[in-house]
Image (tube, helix red, strand yellow):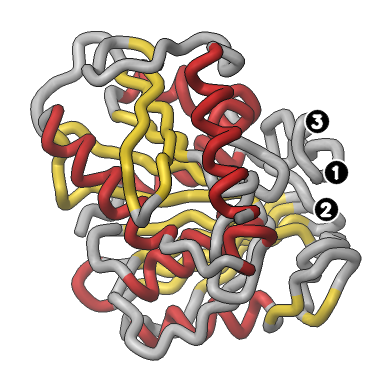
Amino acid sequence: MLLRLAALIGVLLAVSGCWAGARNETRFRDGTSLHTMAFGGLNRSYRVHQPAGLTAAAPLVVMLHGVSGSGEQAENSYGWDPLADSAKFVVAYPDGVGRAWNGHGCCGLAARENVDDVGFITAMVGQISAAMAIDKSRVYATGMSNGGIMSYTLACNSGIFAAIGPNSATQLDACAAPHPTSVIHIHGTADRLVPYDGGKGTSFVNGPPIADVNAFWRNVDHCGPPDSATNALVTTSTAACADHRNVMLITIDGGRHEWPGGNTALERADPTSHALNATEAIWRFFAAHPA
Protein backbone atom coordinates (compact mmCIF):
# COMPACT_ATOMS: atom_id res chain seq x y z
CA MET A 1 0.00 0.00 0.00
CA LEU A 2 2.79 2.44 0.88
CA LEU A 3 4.52 1.64 -2.41
CA ARG A 4 1.35 2.34 -4.42
CA LEU A 5 0.76 5.59 -2.50
CA ALA A 6 4.33 6.79 -3.15
CA ALA A 7 3.98 6.06 -6.84
CA LEU A 8 0.61 7.86 -7.01
CA ILE A 9 2.01 10.93 -5.28
CA GLY A 10 4.91 11.03 -7.74
CA VAL A 11 2.56 10.94 -10.73
CA LEU A 12 0.30 13.64 -9.27
CA LEU A 13 3.28 15.92 -8.69
CA ALA A 14 4.43 15.43 -12.26
CA VAL A 15 1.01 16.17 -13.69
CA SER A 16 0.49 19.24 -11.53
CA GLY A 17 3.71 20.77 -12.80
CA CYS A 18 5.46 20.87 -9.45
CA TRP A 19 8.71 19.86 -11.16
CA ALA A 20 9.58 23.19 -12.72
CA GLY A 21 11.53 23.65 -15.92
CA ALA A 22 10.16 20.65 -17.82
CA ARG A 23 6.88 19.55 -19.39
CA ASN A 24 5.52 16.04 -19.07
CA GLU A 25 5.48 14.82 -22.67
CA THR A 26 6.05 11.79 -24.82
CA ARG A 27 8.57 13.26 -27.25
CA PHE A 28 12.17 14.17 -26.58
CA ARG A 29 13.28 17.70 -27.42
CA ASP A 30 16.18 20.10 -26.96
CA GLY A 31 16.48 21.13 -23.33
CA THR A 32 14.85 19.22 -20.48
CA SER A 33 11.66 17.21 -20.79
CA LEU A 34 9.81 15.07 -18.25
CA HIS A 35 8.65 11.54 -19.09
CA THR A 36 6.69 8.75 -17.42
CA MET A 37 6.59 5.04 -18.10
CA ALA A 38 4.78 2.08 -16.60
CA PHE A 39 7.13 -0.50 -15.14
CA GLY A 40 6.69 -3.23 -12.54
CA GLY A 41 3.11 -2.18 -11.81
CA LEU A 42 4.19 1.41 -11.06
CA ASN A 43 4.21 4.68 -12.92
CA ARG A 44 7.85 5.78 -12.99
CA SER A 45 9.20 9.16 -14.04
CA TYR A 46 12.44 10.58 -15.38
CA ARG A 47 13.84 13.77 -16.87
CA VAL A 48 16.01 13.93 -19.99
CA HIS A 49 18.31 16.78 -20.93
CA GLN A 50 19.07 16.81 -24.65
CA PRO A 51 21.57 19.40 -25.91
CA ALA A 52 20.84 21.42 -29.01
CA GLY A 53 22.65 20.26 -32.15
CA LEU A 54 22.97 16.68 -30.91
CA THR A 55 24.81 14.49 -33.38
CA ALA A 56 24.06 10.84 -34.10
CA ALA A 57 25.38 8.19 -31.73
CA ALA A 58 25.53 10.44 -28.66
CA PRO A 59 26.66 9.18 -25.23
CA LEU A 60 24.08 8.85 -22.45
CA VAL A 61 24.79 9.54 -18.76
CA VAL A 62 22.27 8.34 -16.14
CA MET A 63 22.53 10.56 -13.04
CA LEU A 64 21.02 8.98 -9.89
CA HIS A 65 19.99 11.14 -6.94
CA GLY A 66 20.56 10.20 -3.31
CA VAL A 67 18.07 9.56 -0.50
CA SER A 68 15.58 12.45 -0.17
CA GLY A 69 16.66 13.74 -3.59
CA SER A 70 14.89 13.62 -6.95
CA GLY A 71 15.67 13.81 -10.63
CA GLU A 72 14.96 17.54 -10.57
CA GLN A 73 17.20 18.06 -7.55
CA ALA A 74 20.03 16.11 -9.20
CA GLU A 75 19.68 18.15 -12.38
CA ASN A 76 19.85 21.39 -10.39
CA SER A 77 22.63 20.37 -8.00
CA TYR A 78 25.46 18.74 -9.90
CA GLY A 79 26.09 20.75 -13.05
CA TRP A 80 25.59 18.06 -15.67
CA ASP A 81 23.42 20.06 -18.09
CA PRO A 82 26.00 22.74 -19.04
CA LEU A 83 28.64 20.07 -19.55
CA ALA A 84 26.24 18.01 -21.69
CA ASP A 85 25.48 21.09 -23.80
CA SER A 86 29.15 21.70 -24.52
CA ALA A 87 30.27 18.08 -24.94
CA LYS A 88 27.08 16.96 -26.74
CA PHE A 89 25.82 14.06 -24.66
CA VAL A 90 22.41 13.23 -23.18
CA VAL A 91 21.68 13.12 -19.43
CA ALA A 92 18.81 11.19 -17.83
CA TYR A 93 17.63 11.96 -14.30
CA PRO A 94 15.28 9.20 -13.08
CA ASP A 95 13.19 9.42 -9.89
CA GLY A 96 13.43 6.72 -7.25
CA VAL A 97 10.36 5.38 -5.45
CA GLY A 98 9.96 7.26 -2.18
CA ARG A 99 13.01 9.36 -3.18
CA ALA A 100 15.33 6.37 -2.86
CA TRP A 101 16.80 3.44 -4.84
CA ASN A 102 16.87 -0.26 -4.12
CA GLY A 103 20.63 -0.77 -4.02
CA HIS A 104 20.25 -4.35 -2.71
CA GLY A 105 21.00 -3.41 0.89
CA CYS A 106 19.75 0.18 0.95
CA CYS A 107 17.62 2.35 0.90
CA GLY A 108 14.22 3.47 2.16
CA LEU A 109 10.87 2.38 0.73
CA ALA A 110 12.48 1.19 -2.52
CA ALA A 111 14.61 -1.36 -0.67
CA ARG A 112 11.88 -2.37 1.79
CA GLU A 113 9.46 -3.08 -1.07
CA ASN A 114 12.21 -4.66 -3.22
CA VAL A 115 11.48 -2.34 -6.14
CA ASP A 116 13.06 -3.52 -9.40
CA ASP A 117 15.16 -0.42 -10.03
CA VAL A 118 17.66 -2.32 -12.18
CA GLY A 119 14.80 -3.27 -14.48
CA PHE A 120 13.33 0.23 -14.49
CA ILE A 121 16.60 2.00 -15.27
CA THR A 122 17.42 -0.55 -17.97
CA ALA A 123 13.97 -0.03 -19.52
CA MET A 124 14.39 3.75 -19.31
CA VAL A 125 17.70 3.54 -21.19
CA GLY A 126 15.95 1.41 -23.80
CA GLN A 127 13.13 3.93 -24.18
CA ILE A 128 15.57 6.81 -24.59
CA SER A 129 17.71 4.83 -27.04
CA ALA A 130 14.65 4.04 -29.14
CA ALA A 131 13.75 7.72 -29.40
CA MET A 132 17.17 9.16 -30.25
CA ALA A 133 20.50 7.98 -31.64
CA ILE A 134 22.29 6.88 -28.46
CA ASP A 135 25.65 5.13 -28.81
CA LYS A 136 25.04 1.89 -26.91
CA SER A 137 28.78 1.50 -26.31
CA ARG A 138 28.79 4.80 -24.39
CA VAL A 139 26.06 4.45 -21.77
CA TYR A 140 27.16 5.41 -18.25
CA ALA A 141 25.72 5.64 -14.72
CA THR A 142 26.76 7.93 -11.90
CA GLY A 143 25.17 8.76 -8.59
CA MET A 144 25.36 10.52 -5.27
CA SER A 145 25.24 8.44 -2.06
CA ASN A 146 22.29 6.01 -2.46
CA GLY A 147 22.45 6.84 -6.18
CA GLY A 148 26.10 5.78 -6.22
CA ILE A 149 25.19 2.58 -4.38
CA MET A 150 22.61 2.02 -7.12
CA SER A 151 25.25 2.52 -9.83
CA TYR A 152 27.22 -0.40 -8.34
CA THR A 153 24.03 -2.48 -8.32
CA LEU A 154 23.58 -1.69 -12.01
CA ALA A 155 27.14 -2.77 -12.79
CA CYS A 156 26.56 -6.00 -10.90
CA ASN A 157 23.23 -6.84 -12.52
CA SER A 158 23.12 -5.18 -15.94
CA GLY A 159 25.54 -5.35 -18.82
CA ILE A 160 24.54 -2.11 -20.57
CA PHE A 161 26.86 0.33 -18.78
CA ALA A 162 30.39 0.92 -20.06
CA ALA A 163 31.44 2.70 -16.86
CA ILE A 164 30.03 3.89 -13.54
CA GLY A 165 30.91 6.85 -11.35
CA PRO A 166 29.78 6.42 -7.72
CA ASN A 167 30.32 9.38 -5.39
CA SER A 168 30.12 9.25 -1.57
CA ALA A 169 28.79 5.70 -1.93
CA THR A 170 29.71 2.07 -1.44
CA GLN A 171 28.82 -1.34 -2.83
CA LEU A 172 26.18 -3.31 -0.91
CA ASP A 173 25.16 -5.75 -3.64
CA ALA A 174 26.76 -9.18 -3.20
CA CYS A 175 27.61 -8.96 -6.91
CA ALA A 176 27.86 -12.68 -7.56
CA ALA A 177 28.15 -12.25 -11.33
CA PRO A 178 29.61 -8.79 -11.98
CA HIS A 179 29.86 -7.40 -15.50
CA PRO A 180 33.32 -6.04 -16.42
CA THR A 181 32.89 -2.28 -16.06
CA SER A 182 35.23 0.69 -15.80
CA VAL A 183 34.82 2.41 -12.43
CA ILE A 184 35.65 5.88 -11.11
CA HIS A 185 34.81 6.27 -7.41
CA ILE A 186 35.07 9.60 -5.52
CA HIS A 187 35.02 9.63 -1.73
CA GLY A 188 36.05 11.83 1.20
CA THR A 189 37.95 10.45 4.16
CA ALA A 190 35.69 12.33 6.62
CA ASP A 191 32.39 11.03 5.23
CA ARG A 192 30.22 10.28 8.28
CA LEU A 193 27.23 8.75 6.48
CA VAL A 194 29.16 6.31 4.27
CA PRO A 195 32.51 5.94 6.07
CA TYR A 196 35.58 5.68 3.89
CA ASP A 197 36.94 2.90 6.11
CA GLY A 198 33.66 0.98 6.08
CA GLY A 199 31.21 0.08 8.82
CA LYS A 200 28.10 1.86 10.02
CA GLY A 201 28.26 5.62 10.06
CA THR A 202 25.54 8.09 11.02
CA SER A 203 23.18 6.62 8.41
CA PHE A 204 21.65 3.19 7.76
CA VAL A 205 24.50 2.18 5.42
CA ASN A 206 26.88 -0.48 6.70
CA GLY A 207 29.32 -1.26 3.92
CA PRO A 208 32.87 -2.45 3.29
CA PRO A 209 35.92 -0.19 3.23
CA ILE A 210 36.17 1.75 -0.03
CA ALA A 211 39.63 0.27 -0.61
CA ASP A 212 38.04 -3.20 -0.62
CA VAL A 213 35.40 -2.12 -3.15
CA ASN A 214 38.16 -0.73 -5.35
CA ALA A 215 40.12 -3.99 -5.07
CA PHE A 216 37.00 -6.00 -5.93
CA TRP A 217 36.57 -4.17 -9.24
CA ARG A 218 40.28 -4.34 -10.05
CA ASN A 219 39.91 -8.10 -9.76
CA VAL A 220 36.72 -8.17 -11.87
CA ASP A 221 38.37 -6.08 -14.60
CA HIS A 222 41.69 -7.96 -14.52
CA CYS A 223 43.72 -4.87 -13.70
CA GLY A 224 47.39 -4.34 -13.05
CA PRO A 225 48.73 -2.76 -9.85
CA PRO A 226 47.39 0.77 -9.32
CA ASP A 227 49.49 3.91 -9.60
CA SER A 228 48.87 6.71 -7.13
CA ALA A 229 49.39 10.47 -7.32
CA THR A 230 48.55 13.22 -4.83
CA ASN A 231 47.77 16.85 -5.61
CA ALA A 232 47.03 18.89 -2.48
CA LEU A 233 43.99 17.20 -0.84
CA VAL A 234 43.24 14.86 -3.73
CA THR A 235 44.84 11.44 -4.18
CA THR A 236 44.11 9.51 -7.37
CA SER A 237 44.71 5.76 -7.64
CA THR A 238 44.54 4.45 -11.20
CA ALA A 239 44.71 0.86 -12.43
CA ALA A 240 44.88 -0.10 -16.11
CA CYS A 241 42.80 -3.18 -16.88
CA ALA A 242 42.02 -5.67 -19.61
CA ASP A 243 40.12 -4.55 -22.73
CA HIS A 244 41.14 -0.91 -22.15
CA ARG A 245 39.08 -0.64 -18.98
CA ASN A 246 40.22 1.34 -15.96
CA VAL A 247 39.48 1.40 -12.23
CA MET A 248 40.09 4.74 -10.50
CA LEU A 249 39.66 5.83 -6.88
CA ILE A 250 39.78 9.56 -6.10
CA THR A 251 40.19 10.20 -2.38
CA ILE A 252 39.63 13.68 -0.92
CA ASP A 253 41.49 14.16 2.34
CA GLY A 254 38.99 15.55 4.85
CA GLY A 255 36.17 15.40 2.32
CA ARG A 256 32.72 14.74 3.73
CA HIS A 257 29.44 13.38 2.37
CA GLU A 258 29.19 15.68 -0.63
CA TRP A 259 29.33 16.08 -4.40
CA PRO A 260 32.61 18.00 -4.83
CA GLY A 261 32.10 21.14 -6.88
CA GLY A 262 28.31 20.81 -6.77
CA ASN A 263 25.46 22.15 -4.68
CA THR A 264 24.05 19.58 -2.26
CA ALA A 265 21.99 21.95 -0.13
CA LEU A 266 18.77 20.18 -1.17
CA GLU A 267 19.98 16.71 -0.22
CA ARG A 268 21.19 14.94 2.93
CA ALA A 269 24.79 15.94 2.40
CA ASP A 270 27.48 18.19 3.81
CA PRO A 271 28.45 21.57 2.32
CA THR A 272 30.37 20.96 -0.86
CA SER A 273 34.13 20.99 -1.24
CA HIS A 274 35.86 22.61 -4.19
CA ALA A 275 38.98 20.45 -4.00
CA LEU A 276 37.66 18.74 -7.12
CA ASN A 277 34.87 19.15 -9.67
CA ALA A 278 33.34 15.68 -9.53
CA THR A 279 31.12 16.17 -12.59
CA GLU A 280 34.02 17.15 -14.82
CA ALA A 281 36.25 14.37 -13.45
CA ILE A 282 33.58 11.72 -13.96
CA TRP A 283 32.76 12.88 -17.48
CA ARG A 284 36.44 12.89 -18.53
CA PHE A 285 36.66 9.30 -17.29
CA PHE A 286 33.45 8.28 -19.05
CA ALA A 287 34.49 9.90 -22.33
CA ALA A 288 37.74 7.92 -22.28
CA HIS A 289 36.09 4.56 -21.56
CA PRO A 290 33.51 3.27 -24.03
CA ALA A 291 32.48 -0.38 -23.79
**Residue 157's x, y, as percent?**
34, 73
Q: Between marks 1 and 3, how big is the CA–CA gap? A: 8 Å
Label 1, secondary structure: give it: loop
Q: Residues within 10 Å of mark 2 (few under 14, many from 20)?
A: many
Characterize the local packing of mark 3: few (<14), some (14-19) or many (20 or more) Cα atoms within 10 angstroms: few
Residue ID for mark 3: 265
Q: Secondary structure at mark 2?
A: loop
Disc 3 element: loop
Counting residues from the start of the chain, the first of labels 1 and 2 encountered is: 2
The location of residue 210, given as percent across then percent down, is 66, 75
* Residue 219 position (above or below residue 227): below
The x and y percentages for residue 42 are 42, 47
Question: Residue at horizontal 29%, vertical 76%?
Answer: 179
| In-front residue for pair 232/91 | 91
- Give the residue pinned by disc 2: 256
| Residue 13: quadrant of the picture | top right
Type of the residue with mark 1? Asp
Q: What residue is at 55 percent from the left and 13 percent from the top?
A: 16
Residue carrying label 1: 270
Amino acid type at circle 3 is Ala
- Total number of numbered discs in the rendering: 3
**Viewer-proximal residue among 19 and 242:** 19
Residue 241 relative to residue 106: left or right = left
Q: Badge 1, how many Cα within 10 Å: few under 14, some, many 20+?
A: some
